[in-house]
Amino acid sequence: MGIEGNETADELADAGANEGRMDDDRSAEPTISGIGTTARALANAATSDWWSRCLTGLSASYRKWGLGYSIAEPPELRLPRTLLHRLLAAPNGSWRLRAIP
């Protein structure tokens, strides 16, 4: 009485849920994004561990820095790409990004 083919799909879904990963299942393979996320998490954990080990030997001026630093992008990179291109390509005599008013 159900939709034709739905019973087969239900059986396959139940088999996949009960048996775990099937041979042709690619969903469990790592992705580039997942690898990057894992690498960043491992790097953050290693940095945090290193900081906690070194914290006691640091002077007070270094200790007050804390670990929560972040590297921010320059504000120039937040400009629209067309404007950034014009600023970089504009002749200013020094091959550097000229001051943005």
Image (spheres, helix red, strand yellow):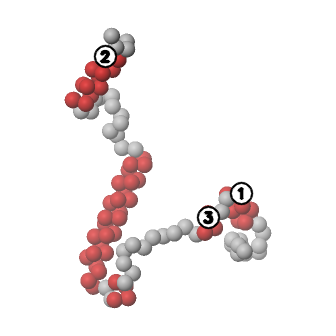
Residue at image location 45% in from the left, 70% down from the top: 70
Under circle 1, the secondary element is helix
In three-dimensional space, the C-alpha distance between marks 3 and 2, rounded to whole angstroms, equals 54 Å
Disc nearest the viewer among 3 and 2: 2
Q: In the figure, 25 relative to 6: above or below?
A: below
Measured Cα–Cα span from mark 1 to mark 2: 55 Å
Q: List x then y, in percent, for residue 97.
A: 69, 71
**In this orientation, which residue lies closer to the viewer: 100 or 97?**
100
Q: Position of residue 72 (x, y in %)?
A: 51, 69
Who comes first in sequence, dot 3 or dot 2? 2
Q: Which quarter of the picture shows residue 62?
A: bottom left
Q: Residue furthest top?
A: 1
* Residue 5 visible (yes or no): no
User: Residue under circle 1?
Assistant: 82
**Label 1 environment density (alpha carbons within 10 Å; few <14, some 14–19, many ≥20):** few
Tell me, yes or no, if residue 13 can be seen here.
yes
Q: How many residues crowd mark 3 within 10 Å: few (<14), some (14–19), many (20+)?
A: few
Q: Is residue 3 above or below residue 47?
A: above
The residue at which mark 2 appears reads as 7
Q: Position of residue 79 (x, y in %)?
A: 65, 63
Q: Is residue 18 left or right of residue 95?
A: left
